[in-house]
Amino acid sequence: MLLPTSALAAEPESITTHSGATTEQERSRIDTYWTPTRMKLAGALVPEITPVPEDDNTPDDPHPLPANTLDPGATWTHGGAVNKSVGRLFFTFSDGYDGSCTATVVNSANRSTIITAAHCLRGVGAPAADGTWNRNLYFVPGYRNGTKPLGGFSIKNMATSSRWDADPSKTTSDDVAVAGHDTGILVANPSAGGRRIADVTGSQKIAFTKPAKDEFIHTFGYPKDRLNDPSATYTGSRMIHCAGPAQPGPKAPLLWGEPCDMSHGASGGPHLAQFDTQSGTGTVVGVTTTSDELAGGQANTLYATRLGDSAHRLYNWAQTRSA
């Protein structure tokens, strides 16, 4: 049963932080850990017997997508800045299995800030408890068919809302998401050559504004359901794009979604307003949190946690951290 927002607001909200790879040895270990095969199989429930997915060789299209074109889901072939600033975020769960989400480099003072979904970083529970936080976090901007076109970046620090520190016997991750707190923030380590991530990838704008009904939104992600369901469409090989008018979730009005057939693996991906299909730039106003199963609404709708005060606090914390 979903908890009302007020049930999660009994205590003042703060920021809960966690350290990632803080030594050169740990950064090197994580970089070595994420081999092409391991990245391709991240998210497979039984990776030992799951076939390595074939590459998605959909031809690139040098022509920009016409503005305000409805897109329920297709491989993004139009290039632009989004091909560099958005990527696949890899991690290892406490049970040892690997997973992945989507994340975006955003404008920031430290040029090292990445935004994703909180549930891609941790589960509900005490911050110091075993199994609360995922490990081996590794961001691959522009990920494509098991390659690292712009290199890979380990994560130095991460943070979520303190709402995730709730007692897991009383509160689920769905409860926290429906209450609008499924935003996670990351501070990336520099590249092997010492460059900050935004100097390598560029970055997208970010805004903390109230959503508007029917605002035209573009969404990007790396869904991977076909790893576990042969009837599904996507394997996480390429970045997928959706676009359409935003609507609030009937069962979760704090979540806003657009028509889209993406699912697992797209979590954390950007929902971009004022997206220029020619340059591939826009403004991140939300991150993917769930599908229509939780938020209600029509089938094949992808919902975002829209960025408000809670996300703004996380962002302000992150951009003051040194990389």
Image (cartoon, grey):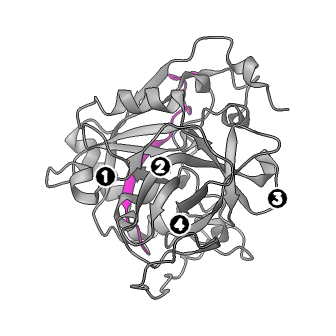
Q: Name the residue under label 1.
A: 153
Q: What segment carries the magenta color?
A: 126-144
Q: Quick one: 214 or 291, which is closer to the camera?
A: 214
Tell me what residue is drawn at x 37 percent, y 27 percent: 317
Distance from label 4 to label 2 (Cα)? Answer: 28 Å
Dot 1: element: strand
User: Residue placed at 68% from the left, 49% from the top?
Assistant: 213
In the figure, is residue 225 to the left or right of 89? right
Residue pushed farthest right?
A: 1
Mark 4 or mark 2: whose residue is earlier in sequence = 4
Which residue position is annotated with label 3?
A: 298
Which SS class for mark 2?
A: strand
**Residue 243, quarter of the rendered image:** bottom right
Image x and y of residue 225, in percent: 66, 66
- Which residue type does callout 3 highlight? Gln
In the figure, 318 relative to 65: above or below? above
How would you classify the magenta stretch by its main secondary structure?
A: loop
Whether residues under marks 4 and 1 lie with C-beta atoms below 8 angstroms apart, the answer is no
Q: How far apart are marks 3 and 4 (CA)?
A: 30 Å
